[in-house]
């Protein structure tokens, strides 16, 4: 019995040390489910980032940014800091956005349409808005 204890004591200490060595670097894994869209959009995101970067690196765009008082390097850094959803939205809308970004033309068109509608209703006698319309 003493012989078994004499052999078991160093072996048990060795096992205790090995258990601590094995379990110490172990960390809790924080995993979550990802959607298929996330996996499929990974390629689109890199393409969108490359497209926005290529547009910002064009000379005419750089000149327009400088004319507006925007630092080109800061604009590049801001586009790199955008989230995946934001960069996809910008890349999707970039071709259809107006060059100047002005809504003045839209306001003028809407105002003219409203004027024409009110003028027609005034001519037809439904409203009495414009005093220059003779009935």
Image (cartoon, rainbow, N blue to C red):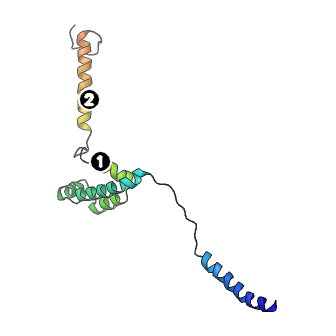
Q: CA distance from mark 1 to mark 2?
A: 26 Å
What residue do we see at 71% from left, 84% from top?
12
Q: Nearer the viewer, residue 35 or 104?
A: 35
Q: Are marks 1 and 2 in contact (CB under 8 Å)?
A: no
Of the numbered discs 1 and 2, the one sitting upstream in the chain is: 1
Q: Element under label 2?
A: helix
Q: Nearer the viewer, residue 95 or 39?
A: 39
Judge whether 34 appears above or below 114 on screen: below
Report x, y in % for residue 26: 58, 72
Disc nearest the viewer among 1 and 2 = 1
**In this rendering, does residue 83 appear at all?**
no
Q: Nearer the viewer, residue 99 or 86?
A: 86
The disc label shown at residue 13, or none: none
**Circle 2 residues within 10 Å: few <14, some 14–19, many ≥20:** few
The disc label shown at residue 92, or none: 1
**In this rendering, does residue 88 appear at all?**
yes
Is residue 115 toward the left or the right of residue 36 in the image?
A: left
Q: Element under label 1?
A: helix
What residue do we see at 25% from left, 34% from top?
106
Q: Residue furthest right?
A: 1
The disc label shown at residue 110, or none: 2
What residue do we see at 67% from left, 86% from top?
14
Q: Quadrant of the N terminus?
A: bottom right
Q: Quadrant of the C terminus?
A: top left
**Circle 1 residues within 10 Å: few <14, some 14–19, many ≥20:** few
Q: Residue furthest top?
A: 135
Judge whether 47 appears above or below 131 on screen: below
Is residue 20 toward the left or the right of residue 8 in the image?
A: left
Judge whether 69 appears above or below 26 on screen: above
Report x, y in % for residue 53: 27, 59
């Amino acid at each position: 019995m003493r012989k078994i204890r004499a052999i078991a004591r160093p072996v048990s200490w060795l096992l205790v040390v090995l258990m601590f060595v094995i379990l110490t670097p172990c960390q809790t894994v924080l995993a979550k489910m990802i959607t298929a869209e996330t996996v499929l959009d990974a390629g689109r995101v890199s393409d969108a980032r490359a497209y926005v970067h290529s547009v910002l690196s064009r000379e005419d765009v750089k000149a327009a940014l400088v004319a507006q008082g925007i630092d080109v390097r800061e604009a590049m850094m801001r586009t790199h800091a955008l989230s995946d959803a934001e960069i996809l939205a910008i890349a999707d809308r970039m071709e259809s956005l107006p060059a100047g970004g002005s809504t003045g033309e839209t306001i003028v068109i809407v105002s003219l349409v409203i004027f024409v509608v009110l003028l027609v209703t005034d001519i037809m006698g439904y409203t009495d808005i414009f005093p220059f319309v003779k009935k």
